Amino acid sequence: MSETTTDELDGTGDDGWVDADDDGEYVYVPEEGGLGRKLLVSVVTILVFLGLVVGVSAYWLYGQVNGTGAETPVAFTVPPEATVAQIANLLEEDGIVSDATLFRYYARWRDLQSIQAGEYQGLTTNDAMADVVDVLAAGPDRPAGVPYTELAVPEGLRLTEIGQRALTQYPEMNDQELSAALATVRSRYQPEGALVEGLLFPATYQVLDTDRADEVKLVTQMVETFDATADEIGLADAPAQLAGQAGSVELTPYDIVIIASLIEEEAKTPEDRARISRVIYNRLARGMRLEIDATVLYAVGQQGGEITQSMLNTDSPYNTRRNAGLPPTPIASPGRDSLLAAMNPSTEPGAENWLYYVLIDEQGNHFFTGDYDEFLTKVDEAREKGLL
């Protein structure tokens, strides 16, 4: 009997071939794919998924950039000194473009760095961004041959001052009609029943000679410029970011405008804006009176000058020498820097303890401290220098 090997008994040879039958023909049975095959399937699946995502995203992006075609014509106004970001927000609000952020990137790609203030025709709702950029780049539709004048509204003016400045610049305007416009044109940040005080943005406005008697148009332009600026700097989200800064006081965007107006009146140098902001928040958090002289002057209707004892005794919600908390409305029109300072109080070392400040030089710089005795010493020094 011949010797039978293990290979012969199980039908396999050293080379892995399996006997198909007795005729000596063989069939190769490959090993399972294992990890390599699974990896290949996974890679293909991921690539297909990514392709679908890219395709859907490209389709969405194409629709956002190209719009849905000409629909309802829109007369669009660009406020004076508005940034591209502010204008993008206004375009989205008017339904001209679908996404302000995407429009900003598209405008940057098209190298649209600035846009002239004025009125623009030829835009529609759901317009193509390429067409919008072309219209804005061409400049406003200022009537040929119609001149214009500029109305300068600096930071820190009160509502009455702005109104008087407009009436002086444009005698064609009517005092009563201007007062009516100031009472009816509203900011999105204006609480029900509040004045538009503090919500007319400081800027230089171009007024066509054909609009010299249009009180509503002028006030609307100033309010829209404020709203656009507030939108750009994120005023609506500021209360959440400032949570706890004023202690138990729950702030609103309008409260922050009030604080900004106080900063505008008190700060004399750019560096002091955020520092004064910190003192205001620290005092609010401790339930202290703000004791800001500018509010006393506002309460008695006086512009500047020395504070008298009779003024300090004035019974008015604006008198922060007598009343704790914020005054009921802004006391002036804050500029962009003061709004930003109200949203970003100083975080300098020791600032969390500041409760007092006093003028220390003719350049308008203030000294800040949390020590009352140190504050009184600096007050005496300021009086000796003739600063107070």
Image (spheres, helix red, strand yellow):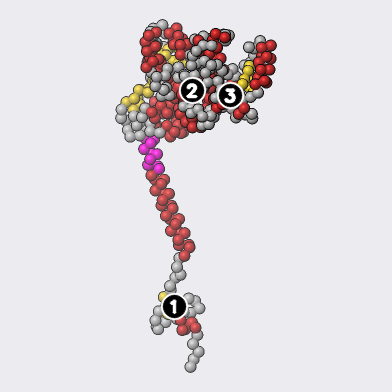
State which region is magenta.
57-66
1 or 2: mark nearer the eye: 2
Label 3 secondary element: helix
Task: Give the residue displayed 51% in from the left and 11% down from the top.
Answer: 314
Q: Is residue 63 magenta?
A: yes
Q: Position of residue 81 (x, y in %)?
A: 47, 21
CA separation in Å, label 1 and label 2: 88 Å
Residue at the left extreme?
71
The chief SS type of the magenta part is helix
- Side of 273 relative to 78 (left or right): right
Q: Is residue 97 above or below residue 385?
A: below
- Side of 333 relative to 52 (left or right): right
Residue 18 tag number: 1
Closer to the chain start, of discs 3 and 1, is: 1
Q: In front here: 373 or 61?
A: 373
Residue 181 tag number: none
CA separation in Å, label 3 and label 1: 90 Å
Instruction: Name the residue tied to disc 3.
Output: 279
Number of other residues with Cα within 10 Å of mark 2, as a class: few under 14, some 14 to 19, many 20 or more: many
Label 2 secondary element: helix
Residue at the bottom extreme?
1
Q: Position of residue 148 (x, y in %)?
A: 42, 12
Instruction: Name the residue tied to disc 2.
Output: 257
Quadrant of residue 120 in the image? top left
The three-letter code of the residue at mark 3 reads: Val
Quadrant of residue 60 in the image? top left
The three-letter code of the residue at mark 2 reads: Val
The three-letter code of the residue at mark 1 reads: Val
Label 1 secondary element: strand
- Side of 290 relative to 222 (left or right): right
